[in-house]
Image: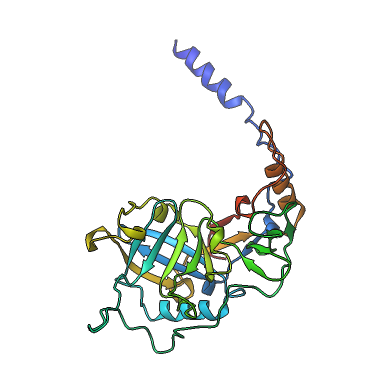
Amino acid sequence: MIISLIALLAAAQAAPATPPAPPLPSDPIAGDWRLIPDDELLVMTLAGNRTVVIRLAPHSAPEHVANVRRLAQAKWWDGQSVYRVQEGWVAQWGDPNDDEPGKPSLRKPMPGDVVKVPAAEYDIATFAPAQRLSRADAYSTASGITADGWPVATDGKASWVTHCYGTVGVARDSSPDTGSGSELFTPIGQAARRLDRNYTIVGRIIEGMQYLSALTRSDAPLGVYATAPERTPIVSARLASDIPAAERPHFEYRATDNARFTAMIDLRLHPKGLVALGGIDVCDVPLAARRVAAK
């Protein structure tokens, strides 16, 4: 019996290992991954040691992103909260207090260098995606993905970044207010394309989205929690560039200006074993990012 077991073990050890599956035409290669600059990463820590990482979009919303950076460097979000979670719509965070006429303000003062009403940044300069989708949609005449991984659309006159699941927008009051960037939100149930060109997009969540999308929904109007204990406290929000080097996270995004990303979109257009409808929404295109070791 012992001899048989030894023989079986020897045979198992001698058996050749199963070779890895060959790469698919849609699989990224090492050169498709590009490093995200540290000052384009906002690291938000929620109560319970839950980390949400936001990739900022300074190229499409420079003034609002500048405000976000100033707020992070002033530690303005520390002690604030996720105070709104509306089913099928958005999670929103910042200062839950509203000003009431004739009463002292309970809102946390913002740093003096924050521009309270930046220029409107609902549009981008040009529509120049590296990957253009084959069909128009209900919200645009054309859409696609930029080389650096942002979903964009156009109506032939204006162009903009689209509100997809996980994008981070700037909450605001009625126009002409554009929002300072202190109150932010993300769609948690689906894309929110009807917000396109109405709210500024300052980033996209690339890690920890589950910590916002899984929060308890509020039945109160607009999903704003009725009581303070329902809110999720924000422990801190820091630019990665302001975190000590030994603790700083690093991320890469998947570039789209290559044949492998084209092949991935083609698989979405023509899924094997499923009925192909011949088109996809720009928010259906997966935009990958990954955490990497320091280089």
Q: Residue at x 48, y 75 (%)?
A: 241
Q: Is residue 95 visible?
A: yes
Residue 142: percent from left, percent from top? 72, 59
Residue 117: percent from left, percent from top? 47, 83
| Quarter of the figure that contains the N terminus | top left
Q: Residue at x 34, y 63 (%)?
A: 82
Looking at the picture, tell me which residue is in the foreground, 20 or 133. 133
Q: How many marks?
A: 0
Q: Residue at x 27, y 82 (%)?
A: 101
Q: Is residue 238 above or below residue 18?
A: below
In the image, 249: left or right of 218?
Answer: right
| Quarter of the figure that contains the C terminus | bottom right
* Type of colouring: rainbow
Q: Is residue 247 visible?
A: no
Q: Residue at x 74, y 47 (%)?
A: 263
Residue 225: percent from left, percent from top? 29, 60
Looking at the picture, tell me which residue is in the foreground, 257 or 151. 151
Q: Residue 183 occupies which quadrant of the picture?
A: bottom left
In the image, 196: left or right of 226?
Answer: right
Residue 244: percent from left, percent from top? 43, 73
Residue at the bottom extreme, as displayed = 112
Residue at the top extreme, as displayed = 1
In the image, 85: left or right of 154?
Answer: left
